[in-house]
Image (cartoon, rainbow, N blue to C red):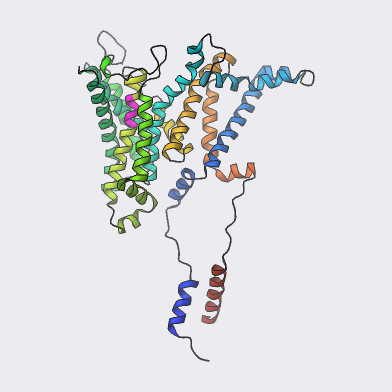
Amino acid sequence: MKPKPPEKEAHMSDHSTPQAAPAQPAGESVLRRIFTGNATVSVLSVVLAIVLGGILMAVTNPRVAATAGYFFAQPGDLLGEVFRPYVALVQGSIFNWAGADFAAQMYPITETLTVSTPLICAGLGVALAFLAGLFNIGAQGQIIFGALFGAYTGFAWHLPAGLHLLVVMLAGLIGGAVWGGVVGLLKARTGAHEVIVTIMLNYIANFLLLFLLTTPAFQRKGSTNPISPFLDPNALFPELLGPQFRLHAGFLVAVLATAFVWWLLNRSTVGFEFRAVGANPNAARTAGINVARSTILVMAIAGALAGLAGIAQVSGTEKYLSGGVAASIGFDAITVALLGRSTPWGTFFAGLLFGAFRAGGVAMQAQTQTPIDIVLVIQSLIVLFIAAPPLVRAIFGLNPRKKKTTPSATAGSKTAGLKSGAAA
């Protein structure tokens, strides 16, 4: 029996032996699947959460039980009670058709845009960090530091109109970038896990804020409450639709920030390096990318975006600094980035959705006596379903397509089997 030429054998082994994919940490793989899954799953997760939220509201509403007793006589009463909370939610977040005038009718959508502004900015910070392989839980602390820096320059300095607002925005960006850059520096130089570091820095930022608001430099004169003086009028975002609405130019800044992040990720060399490091840091390092520098830079930019959310609060919505300036925005931003699949415009629209939930929840509670906590339940359900794509696909019958076996792969596997049998 003539032996095979070595060239042919080498050729066959090249085509028959499958190359093993580089191993990735299990936790990172799970997070990446959650963040970068199909957009259809995100939409269906929202739908499913809204349906389950409606069922929960119907079950706990005594008027639904009362109208169910004569459902076949007047089915409209039951359906009206079931959908009434969501009608109130839409009426309080998008358009109030019962308003006395046009301003009252349009007020809900302006509130949605106002509430969405910090959610969008902070959500962009979380999304950008994740695309670089970092799980940024520290948006809360970065918002606080952005608000601290911006508010101080807003009420302690007195500059001309236009210039003052730019200085406040720059100070807020620097404050957030410093607090986020600390995380990137510790991650790059010491290997500290960014989740632990950001959580601890959230506590530091929160308690530092509460302390500073009791000092003469930050506390409002003549007040015993831990609040700062009002920002100088030149340090405030202009009102877009007049004093009867709270909507300010910070929303336009959020739109520009979304466009900037899109350009950064898709049209710049730095953004390409971020995505390369997030996809595979070892391969990126082999290709000549400075992984440590990218880690520090992406966390600084993410912190700056979150700091911009703090500026939207102090220079736009609140007009002063308080202990609750960040509220739960930093943690809601994680949900916004999840729903937006870490894409800039996906995060933008997810921020609008969650802003509508928060703005309409107040009207829902006032009109239907439905607890506003139900909105938090719906948001939590959205996160739950986004984190479990197989469950959503199974509920809606969207089974993933099976990969087709190509003839070359089949032939390669057969050749490999013959060779292994011959070797045995």
**Residue at 30% of width from left, 30% of height from top?**
204
- Looking at the image, residue 126 sits to the left or right of residue 107; the answer is left
**Residue at 59% of width from left, 28% of height from top?**
53
Residue 328 screen position, x and y as percent: 42, 27
Relative vertical location of residue 204 with respect to residue 293 in this rendering, above or below? above
Magenta-drawn segment: 306-311
The image quadrant of residue 315 is top left
Looking at the picture, tell me which residue is in the foreground, 77 or 40: 40
Relative vertical location of residue 242 with respect to residue 297 in this rendering, above or below? above
The image quadrant of residue 167 is top left
Whether residue 77 appears in this view of the structure is yes
How many marks the image carries: the answer is 0
Looking at the picture, tell me which residue is in the foreground, 213 or 256: 256
- Looking at the image, residue 246 sits to the left or right of residue 75; the answer is left
Q: What kind of secondary structure does the magenta stretch mostly adopt?
A: helix
**Residue at 65% of width from left, 19% of height from top?**
61
